[in-house]
């Protein structure tokens, strides 16, 4: 082999070694790149898995008192606190994980505030799962309180005066109530408790919560501490004065029952005939028609007072009474100061002179005092609550929860500081991972 051939052979061998080195270098680079991509994918996959776990960890910190008292799941926090917790989870879970470069977590809880009526309504739907609406009707768990007979407010009236408490209430003083006339119309359309069952079958979950968790003047569902005595009544009236709520509902009950009793009275021929006869006896002539109206209204009002006494003793009162369900007689009506003061002097004299004759007439109308059917206090008040504007009703129930949580557990409790979901972002190896979860 000559020198030229040797040189060419050496050149070929050198070129082959260079190509082989290039190939091996490229292969090594590919392996390194694959390892990097694999590492990034592994880290990303771990972040996704851990992120879901961290979301659940945040949600698992729901307030136990909210859960026990109202079956509502929500946790206390804010963006900074949740971000700090997530950073701790990140450092613990991802430490030493394939040289993962972590910038930290950034939580954004906007839109998950329990104080948002939409979120609160969702939380209620979750809490009501599996609970039958029939519990509203049968009064399961509610007991009579025996506070009074409806003639007075026997408990110490509480008034919420703290401006901070008032200003942070979810309702923010939203107005709205229900009139006694509206209650009368609702009661007519419903009838007795069997009709109420059908009416409430489509009731919102807040009605069920009201029945299960809040007091009214006549019944209570539990032995927990309640700041207000008249919580159902607060939902109807919305006053910071507990006694004002009681009296407002009592007035509406009186107006409704009085209208229903007056209608029942005029539908009873025997009572109408008796009223006409008595009126003509004590007020002869054209003014007798005025006396008829006076007697009818006074009789209906006296019957209504008896009805309210029964309702405040947790008894039932029929919506539209039949003749044999009437409890008062005309003799008591004519003997009342309410009637005597409105009669002229001549009519009062005739009333005294012909008292025996009138007594004989009134004895022809029989009465009973015990009712097996009808609506009780809870059911009449529920009709008023149902007639409220949906948003007003929901907001005032939210008020009651906030008031009681302050009273029982935390003086600074505020629904806007409790959340029903979590949303956060973490940056790992230059890639952003977003997570969002809520109670389901």
Image (cartoon, helix red, strand yellow):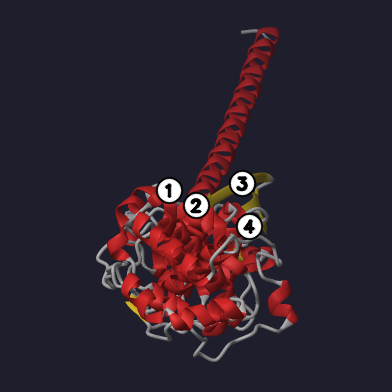
Image height check: is 397 above or below 335?
A: above
Mark 2: which secondary structure? helix
Q: Residues within 10 Å of mark 1 (few under 14, many from 20)?
A: few
**Crowding near the residue tagged with mark 3, few <14, some 14–19, many ≥20 C-alpha atoms within 10 Å:** some
Which of pointers 3 and 2 lies earlier in the amino acid sequence? 2
Q: Residues within 10 Å of mark 4 (few under 14, many from 20)?
A: some
The location of residue 385, given as percent across then percent down, is 51, 60
Residue 116 is tagged as 4
Image quadrant assignment for residue 6: top right
Residue located at (66% from left, 64% from top):
171
Which mark, residue 185? 2
Q: CA distance from mark 4 to mark 1?
A: 34 Å
Q: Which of labels 3 and 4 is toward the front? A: 4
Single out the mark in the foreground, 3 or 1.
1
283 is higher (above) or lower (below) than 135: below
Which secondary structure, mark 4?
loop
**CA separation, marks 1 and 2?**
6 Å
Q: Is residue 278 left or right of residue 250?
A: left
Q: Give the labeled residue for mark 3.
A: 434
Q: Whole-Å distance between the Cαs marked 4 and 2?
A: 33 Å
x then y, percent, for residue 24 = 58, 28
Q: Which residue is mark 1?
A: 189
Could you tell me how far apart the alpha carbons at marks 3 and 1 are, in whole angstroms? 53 Å
């Amino acid at each position: 082999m000559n020198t030229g051939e040797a040189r060419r052979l050496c050149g070929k061998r050198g070129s082959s070694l260079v190509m082989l080195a290039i190939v091996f270098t490229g292969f090594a680079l590919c392996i390194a790149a694959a390892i990097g991509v694999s590492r990034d994918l592994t880290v990303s996959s771990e972040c996704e898995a851990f992120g879901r776990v961290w979301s659940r960890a945040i949600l698992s910190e729901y307030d136990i008192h909210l859960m026990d008292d109202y079956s509502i799941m929500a946790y206390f926090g804010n963006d900074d606190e949740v971000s700090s917790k997530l950073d701790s989870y990140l450092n613990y879970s991802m430490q030493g994980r394939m040289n993962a470069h972590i910038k930290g977590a950034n939580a954004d809880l906007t839109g998950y505030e329990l104080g948002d009526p939409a979120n609160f309504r969702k939380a209620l739907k979750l809490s009501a799962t599996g609970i039958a609406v029939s519990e509203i009707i049968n009064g399961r768990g509610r007991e009579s309180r025996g506070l009074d007979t409806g003639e007075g407010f026997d408990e110490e009236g509480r008034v919420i005066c703290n401006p901070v408490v008032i200003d942070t209430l979810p309702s923010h003083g939203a107005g709205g109530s229900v009139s006694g006339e509206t209650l009368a119309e609702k009661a007519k359309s419903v009838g007795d408790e069997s009709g109420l069952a059908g009416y409430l079958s489509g009731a919102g979950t807040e009605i069920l919560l009201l029945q299960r968790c809040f007091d009214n003047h006549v019944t209570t569902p539990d032995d927990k501490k309640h700041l207000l005595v008249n919580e159902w009544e607060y939902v109807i009236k919305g006053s910071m004065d507990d006694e004002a709520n009681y009296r407002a509902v009592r007035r509406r009950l009186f107006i409704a029952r009085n209208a229903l009793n007056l209608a029942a009275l005029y539908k009873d021929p025997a009572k109408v005939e008796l009223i006409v006869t008595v009126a003509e006896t004590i007020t002869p002539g054209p003014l007798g028609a005025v006396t008829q109206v006076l007697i009818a209204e006074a009789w209906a009002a006296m019957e209504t007072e008896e009805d309210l006494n029964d309702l405040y003793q947790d008894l039932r009162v029929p919506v539209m009474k039949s003749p044999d369900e009437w409890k008062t007689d005309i003799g008591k009506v004519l003997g009342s100061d309410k009637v005597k003061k409105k009669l002229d002097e001549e009519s009062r004299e005739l009333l005294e002179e012909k008292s025996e004759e009138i007594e004989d007439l009134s004895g022809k109308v029989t009465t009973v005092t015990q009712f097996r059917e009808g609506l009780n206090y809870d059911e009449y008040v529920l009709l008023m609550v149902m007639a409220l504007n949906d948003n007003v009703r929901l907001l005032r129930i939210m008020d009651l929860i906030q008031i009681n949580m302050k009273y029982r557990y935390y003086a600074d409790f505020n629904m806007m500081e409790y959340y029903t979901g979590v949303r956060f972002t973490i940056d790992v190896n230059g890639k952003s991972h977003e997570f969002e979860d809520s109670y389901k």
